[in-house]
């Protein structure tokens, strides 16, 4: 008994390579796992002198100043650079671009000249 073989046109290299590419059955799963891999750190307690220095810097800031700020959020320290858009001394927070940061979460501020 003879088997009839169907002739197919040759496959392009790109199509052939696609056969061997990994298949992601759970779309977005890899990115979710990477977010969970971050290292959680303890909040660093500042000394009295460090608090005074930060307080002096905060009180010297003006809206539209460009600053680099390091602050604690959700178990990690984050550094951003941007323009001060609001400072609220009554509620103790600063807004850099569109990020609201509590004074108590600030680790360091440098003003770009």
Image (spheres, rainbow, N blue to C red):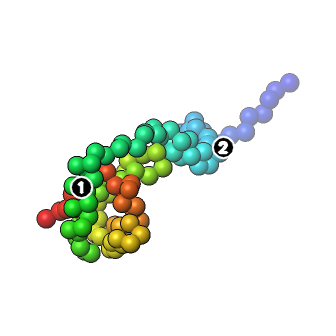
* Vertical relation: 92 (above or below) 30: below
* Vertical relation: 98 (above or below) 24: below
Specify whether 109 is left or right of 90.
left
Task: Please tell me how crowded label 1 is: few (under 14), some (14-19), or many (20+) other residues with Cα within 10 Å.
Answer: few
> Earlier along the polypeptide chain: callout 2 or callout 1?
2
Image-quadrant location for residue 95: bottom left
Q: SS class of the residue under badge 1?
A: helix
Residue 72, x across and y down, in percent:
40, 50
Say which of 109 and 6 sits in front.
109
Residue in the image at 27% along x and 48% along y: 48
Give how far apart the Cα atoms at labels 2 and 1 are.
53 Å
Asked whether residue 97 appears in the rendered view, the answer is: no
Label 1 sits on residue: 52
Residue in the image at 46% along x and 45% along y: 75
Residue 77, x across and y down, in percent:
38, 47
Residue 34, x across and y down, in percent:
51, 42
Residue 52, x across and y down, in percent:
24, 55
Label 2 sits on residue: 25
Q: Residue furthest right?
A: 1
Q: Which residue lies furthest to the top in this view?
A: 1
Specify whether 99 is left or right of 12.
left
């Amino acid at each position: 008994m003879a088997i009839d073989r169907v002739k197919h046109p040759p496959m392009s290299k790109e199509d052939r390579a696609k056969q061997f590419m990994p298949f992601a059955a759970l779309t977005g799963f890899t990115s979710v796992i990477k977010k969970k891999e971050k290292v959680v750190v303890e909040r660093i307690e500042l000394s009295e002198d460090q608090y005074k220095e930060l307080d002096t810097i905060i009180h010297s800031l003006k809206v539209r100043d460009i600053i680099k700020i390091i602050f604690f959020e959700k178990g990690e320290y984050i550094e951003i650079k941007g323009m001060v858009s609001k400072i609220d001394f009554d509620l103790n927070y600063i807004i850099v671009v569109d990020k609201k940061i509590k004074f108590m979460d600030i680790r360091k501020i440098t003003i770009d000249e």
